[in-house]
Amino acid sequence: MVATPARAHFEPGKNEGDGDFKSELLALIPFLRAFARSLTGNQEGADDLAQETLVKAWQSRSTFIPGTNLKAWLFTILRNQFYSDRRRAWRQAPWDQEAAERIPGGGEDQVFSAQLSDTARALRVLSDEQREALILVGAGGFSYEDAAAICKCAVGTVKSRVARARKALMEILDGDDTLDGVSRPAEGDAAREIMAQLDRLAPPEAGDTGGKRRPK
Amino acid sequence: MSEEKPNEKSRAIRARQRAIGRELRRMYDDVAQEPVPEDFLDLLRRIDDAEDARPGKKVS
C-alpha cells in the first residue's frame, strides 16, 4: 500500500538503492546549505534553494551515475536552480525591488548587512561568476575541474575567475592602499560606498548572468 | 629599505590573500557545521511518499 503510482516509472531495481541515495543526500545537506548561502547571501532564501535542490535531485536520481561525484552533481542542480529561480523572480518583480536588495543599507537589508562580516559583504559585490568560482574552489574544496563542470565553463575560465575574485575581494576589503600594507579601512562607510559604486556600475541584468554572454 | 619593495608587497598580498581565504572557508564551514534544520529532514521523509513533495513550504 506504500507504493504510489508515481513510483511506477522508475526501473525495477532502481528503488533498492533509494535508501542509500537518500542517506547520501542527507549527508550532503550541510554543504548544499553552505553553497546556497554563499549564492543567495541570506539564510531563508538559501534554505529554500537547498530544499528545491533536494527535491530536484530526488526526482532526477535515476540520472545520477553511481560512483561519480554526487556532491558536484548536487551543486550543479543547486546552481541551475538558483539562476532559474532568479530569472523568474526577475521577470515577476519590479526591477527596483531586487536592486534595492542588492544595495547594502537599503531597507530591511540594512539590518542583515550589519550582521555580516566585511568579507561576507565584500563577497556580495563580486560578479556571480567570480563569487561561485571562488566559493567552490576556495571554500568548498572542489578541484578546478569539478568547479568547471559545475559552472559549465572551461577549467581555465574557472582559474581566471578565482584569481580575479581573490584580487577583487582584497581590493574591496582593503581599499586602494592594499600594496602599502595589510591594514584596511575600519569604517563600514568606505566599504559601503565601494559597494554602492559597484552596484551602479553593474547594470541590473541578473537574467543573463547564468550563461555568460561572451564565452570568448 | 623602501616600503615599495616588490617582494614585500607580494608577500603582504599573499598573506592577505591567505587570510581572506581562511575567512571564506570559515564562513562556508560555519554554515556546513550547523545542525540540519528539521524541515530538511522532514522533506526527506516526505519525499518517499510523494514524488512531488514541494520544497519551500515552511514546515512551521
Image (spheres, coloured by chain):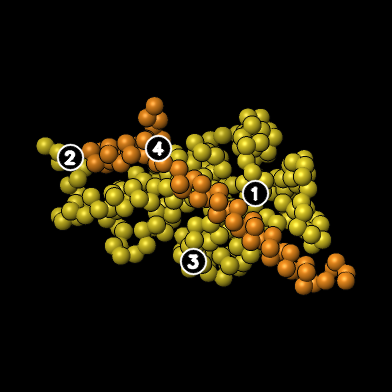
Looking at the rendered structure, the kind of residue marked 4 is Pro
| Secondary structure under the numbered disc 1 in the rendered image | helix
Q: Position of residue A107 (x, y in %)?
A: 66, 29
Q: Is residue B36 visible?
A: yes
Q: Which mark is residue A208?
A: none
Residue located beneath label 1 in the image: A119
- How crowded pointer 4 is (Cα within 10 Å; few <14, some 14-19, many 20+) is rated as few
| Secondary structure under the numbered disc 4 in the rendered image | loop
| Secondary structure under the numbered disc 2 in the rendered image | loop
Which chain is depicted orange? B
Residue located beneath label 2 in the image: A4
Q: Nearer the viewer, residue A177 or A64?
A: A177
Choose the circle earlier in sequence order: 3 or 1. Answer: 1
- CA distance for labels 4 and 2: 27 Å
Say whether mark 1 and mark 4 are on the same chain: no
Chain that bears disc 3 = A
Q: Nearer the viewer, residue A98 or B20?
A: B20
Choose the circle earlier in sequence order: 1 or 2. Answer: 2
Whether the residues at callouts 1 and 2 have beta carbons within 8 Å, the answer is no
- CA distance for labels 4 and 3: 28 Å
